[in-house]
Every structure is written in C-alpha cells, then in structure tokens.
Image (cartoon, rainbow, N blue to C red):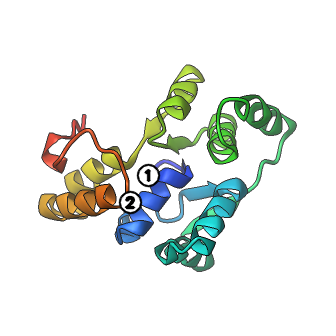
Amino acid sequence: MPEVVFDCCVISNFALSGPLTVLLSMYSGTSYITNFVSAEISRGIQNGHGELASVKEALKNGWLKEITLETDEEKALQEKLSVSLGFGEASSIAVAKMRGYVFASDDKVARREANLLGIPLTGTLGILAKSVNKSIITMNTADSYLKKMTAHGFYSPVNSAKEIDSS
C-alpha cells in the first residue's frame, strides 16, 4: 500500500463512525497525520467528540504516525497553501508533495490544490470503495459506516457505497 497522509476530515469520518479499523486494515504502517492535524483532533476531543480518542490510540499503537514538516521546502509550501487552506490541510499537502505520499482529503479546495500539484488523492468514499473491493468490509458494512458518517455531518454525494466509482 502507498503511504497516505490524512487530513482531519477523513480520519475524523472514520473515527467518529467507528470504523478506524478500516484504515488500520488498509494502511497499517503507511498512515500519517501531521502535527497540525493531531492538534485539530485534540481540539475535537476537548470539544466533546470522545470518539476521536481512537486516533490518539492509533498513534500510541504505532500503526498511525504523527509527522512534522522537516524541510524548508515543506515549510514554504505549507505557508503558501495556508493562505487559502487550514493548517491541517496545508501541512498534509506539503508532506504529500515533498515525500510522494497520497493525500486523503474530502475538502474540495484542498483536493483542487493537491491536484494542481500532481499529488495522488483519495478520500472517505474512495477508501470505503477500496475496502469493499479488497474484501476488508462488505457492501452492507460500508453503507452502515457511510450512514453513520453522514449522521456526524459528512456530506456525501452518494447514499450507498454501491454508487461509488471505484475505478
């Protein structure tokens, strides 16, 4: 599996809906969040979203890793992108671009910026579709997770994982 850096939205969708184990099965050892995304997760926990603690547990268990911007190039790109994006998305794009990672985001503006930079993309729906295709979860389970995600505020253009183009 490729190395993937998650923005707060995607990892939160899975954590708030229970199936963080899907990410473990799909990307164990190749999953990252930046320290900016980790701070957003901590803020969410402090604001009463206790389910997000599973992200902190994943960090403690080591299958998800927290990374920081290391090079001047990463820092410069993050600074440039933070004019139009949040720090979590900007830092994640900078890491993905400079390290050759896939960027996991559902944010339209962040995805557009990443696409302009030639960064491979995935998102919540793509991960659900891939997990069904790899027989990690069933279609019914994917639909159950999608329903929970939308109940937590995720905007989905589809009502069922059957509608996701997994090509």
Quarter of the rendering occupied by the C terminus: top left
Of the two numbered discs 1 and 2 in the rendering, the one whose residue sits closer to the viewer: 2
122 lies left or right of 135? right
Considering only vertical position in the picture, is 42 above or below 124?
A: below
Residue pointed to by mark 2: 26
Give the spatial CA distance, label 1 vs label 2: 8 Å
Task: Specify the quadrant of the image occupied by residue 114.
Answer: top right
Residue 24 is at least partly visible in this image: no
Whether residue 91 is visible to the viewer of this picture, yes or no, is: yes
Disc 1 marks which amino acid? Met
| Disc 1 to disc 2: CB gap under 8 Å | yes
Inspect the image, locate mark 2, and give the three-letter code of the amino acid beneath it.
Met
Query: Can you give x and y, in whole percent of width and height, for residue 113 in the image?
Result: 57, 26
Between 120 and 39, which is closer to the camera in this rendering?
39
Image quadrant of residue 23? bottom left
Q: Which element is circle 1 on?
A: loop
Q: Residue at x 18, y 65 (%)?
A: 141
Q: Earlier in the sequence, mark 1 or mark 2?
A: 1
42 left or right of 145?
right
Q: On the rendered structure, is 134 left or right of 99?
A: left
Rendered location of residue 80, percent (x, y): 76, 28
Residue at point 32% right, 59% down? 149
How many numbered discs sit on the rendered protein? 2
Q: Disc 2 on helix, strand or loop? A: helix
Q: In this view, does 151 lie above or below 48?
A: above
Residue plotted at (21% across, 42% down): 158
**Where does residue 84 sit, x and y in percent of width and height?**
66, 30
Depth order, front residue of 17/60: 17
Residue at 60% over, 23% down: 117
Residue at which label 1 appears: 1
Q: In the image, is 156 to the left or to the right of 82?
A: left
Which label was assigned to residue 16?
Answer: none
